Amino acid sequence: MNKFFSIFTFLSLMLCAFGQPNADQVQSRIEGTSRTQSSLPSQTANSPTTAVADTAESDTGAQRPVSLTDGEISAFFGYDTKYFYRSNPLAQDGDLSQVETDMWTNTFFAGLSSVIESDKGVYTPYINSAYTVNDYLIDDLGDFNYNTSHISTGLFYYYGGTATYYAKIDYNMDKSTEFDTEDFSEFFPQIGMLTSFQPSTNFALRSTLGFGYHYTKITATGSTRPEDLLDNFEVYALLSPSIPSFPLLETVGLTYRLSYQNYDNGAYSNREDFSHSILSKYELPLFESDAPDLYLYSIYSLRNSNDNTFDYKSVDAGFGLSLMARF
């Protein structure tokens, strides 16, 4: 059944230039889209499409998910634009390069947070949002252009030691640019922690560890593909090494992301995926600001499934410009 589904999706892709993409084509694109892990600062390897705020450190040593001013409330807003190459935009099984395309994305983002300090710890409630326009720059994929809405809200809390904990809910929604249809939406409640391991003076590892459940909705097309087909439980880790004797590692901002996903419904029952991605990002300040404005980045993504028809690999590489104001 899954092999037939994969073959049908591939054949449909070859015909997409002749009409509106069908549900199988759209689902293939959805599964190849990296969903943002907003508010996990400097650790966001699955989210090249959404800007996040920097981590700051309070007087009590707490890692904070947003950059805070001296007042009780801090806010930011900004704009990010990226032009990049993507080798496998529809996450097809097989070669690294399939239906290659250049992409152009434009993101408008904003956030609001506060800090609450008490004898027991430091608490940082926040809300972030982003709206992204995603354009494929080859004609055969033009009908797949889509806009993404993202909202994240939650709480970071610090009780002492090296870890900051969080509980949050992310909302994501994709809407077709060409056909004005809602192709995908999800709520993703999750909990986790940010911490740093330093076994020696020569090595440190910043990490984010978390888990949650994706409550999703797509267009249903029968009992084997219900609207909650993409529901899954996910456990993820983001790791950023630091080696003082190897400064190039800091310069390129290397981050590795690993996740495990277990699906429940329809034709995806008992599906299990392990996904890997490696992100490097080199930042170049153009103007006087708190954050670099111009950056170069690359991402290598790999998915291994217990059903190899869902395996894929892909590369993104390009440059971007990000502008942000804080107040």
Image: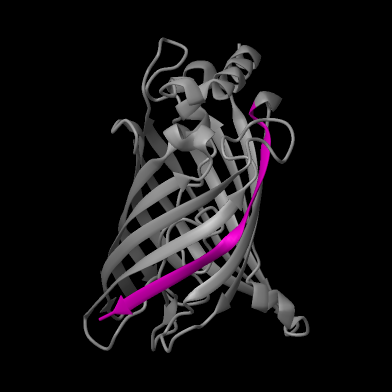
Pick whichever, 114 or 281, lies toward us: 281
Could you tell whether 91 is left or right of 61 in the image? right
Q: Give the residue displayed 47% in from the left and 28% down from the top.
A: 27
**Can see residue 256?**
no
The verdict on residue 323 being magenta is: yes
Pick whichever, 230 or 194, lies toward us: 230
Could you tell whether 324 is left or right of 319 in the image? left
Q: Which residues are magenta?
A: 310-327
Chief secondary structure of the magenta span? Answer: strand
Q: Give the residue displayed 29% in from the left and 85% down from the top.
A: 69
Pick whichever, 80 or 18, lies toward us: 18
Q: Quadrant of residue 252?
A: bottom right
In the rendering, at what x and y percent does residue 133 appear?
Answer: 37, 50
Could you tell whether 207 is left or right of 309 in the image? left
Relative to 130, say whether 7 is above or below.
above
> Which quadrant would the N terminus be assigned to in this image?
top right
In the rendering, at what x and y percent does residue 194 appear?
Answer: 50, 66
Q: Give the residue displayed 21% in from the left and 81% down from the top.
A: 72
